Image (tube, coloured by chain):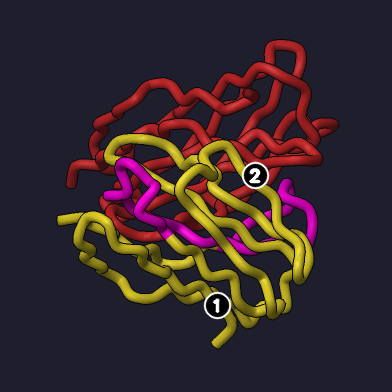
Chain colours: A red, B yellow
Amino acid sequence: SQQGEEDPQALSIQEGENATMNCSYKTSINNLQWYRQNSGRGLVHLILIRSNEREKHSGRLRVTLDTSKKSSSLLITASRAADTASYFCAPGSARQLTFGSGTQLTVLP
Amino acid sequence: DGGITQSPKYLFRKEGQNVTLSCEQNLNHDAMYWYRQDPGQGLRLIYYSQIVNDFQKGDIAEGYSVSREKKESFPLTVTSAQKNPTAFYLCASSISRPNNEQFFGPGTRLTVL
């Protein structure tokens, strides 16, 4: 399985700080996506990075991808209390998108 | 409003009963998916469908069944054969291939009493 594995499992920071979450996976991918889930809700797509890209930005989000190390990172800059949620990476192959167990981010006001 | 809806939001079932979860989308997406999420866990794929009248088993299909008679609809039946059905069920859709961006519904929380 090429399920992504996020690290850390939980992260607690103060508002205004940056939050970094990491993802590792096992097999080759076409792309890697990051999703966010508020408690008890569905997932929301944040950003997609293709296998031939190394870095991508979207607002306060910055994603990097290192296919040689089979790893990705999600950086949220200037965090807000509203960023409190679980964040999942999802390595994508032609056949399937798989999800890890997520990083639970808590941003303290 | 374009989107994907699931109903009901909460569902209670007695042991031994089958129950059907609804999923509807008006995004004109070809592909639809059902995932199961247990507390503190990631999502596990139950079934997916890339076209009407066709669907494929995911990683944990045992005890579940689906149909795809219409492009907009992908209902999931949790049968009495599913040993531990209490979970949060999420439906998603995408334009075509599974590795495209997936759009998720709000989920159905199923509790077996």
Q: Is residue B101 magenta?
A: yes
Looking at the rendered image, the disc whose residue lies closer to the viewer, 1 or 2, is 1
The outermost residue toward the bottom is B1
In this image, A11 relative to B6: left or right? left
Instruction: Tell me the residue at 54%/88% (across/down).
Output: B1
Residue in view at x 51 percent, y 39 percent = B60
Labels 1 and 2 positioned on one and the same chain: no
For badge 1, the amino acid type reads: Glu
- Magenta stretch holds residue B38: no
Q: CA distance from mark 1 to mark 2?
A: 32 Å
Q: Which residue is mark 1?
A: B24
Chain of the residue on which disc 2 is drawn = A
Q: Residue furthest top?
A: A69
Residue A18 seen anywhere in this rendered image of the structure: no
Decide if residue A56 is in sight here.
yes
CA neighbours of label 2 inside 10 A, class few (<14), some (14 to 19), many (20+): some
**Image-based side of B2 in relation to A78, left or right:** right
Where residue B101 sits, quadrant-wise, is: bottom right
- Asked which secondary structure carries label 2, the reply is strand
Nearer the observer, B57 or A34: B57
Magenta residues span B78-103
Say few, some or many: other residues with alpha carbon within 10 Å of mark 1 (under 14 / 14 to 19 / 20 or more). Answer: many
Q: Which residue is mark 2?
A: A57
Residue at mark 1: chain: B
Q: Quadrant of residue A33?
A: top right
Q: Residue at position x 27%, y 40% from top?
A: B39
**Magenta highlight: main SS:** loop
Identity of the residue furthest to the right in this view: A52
Mark number, residue B13: none
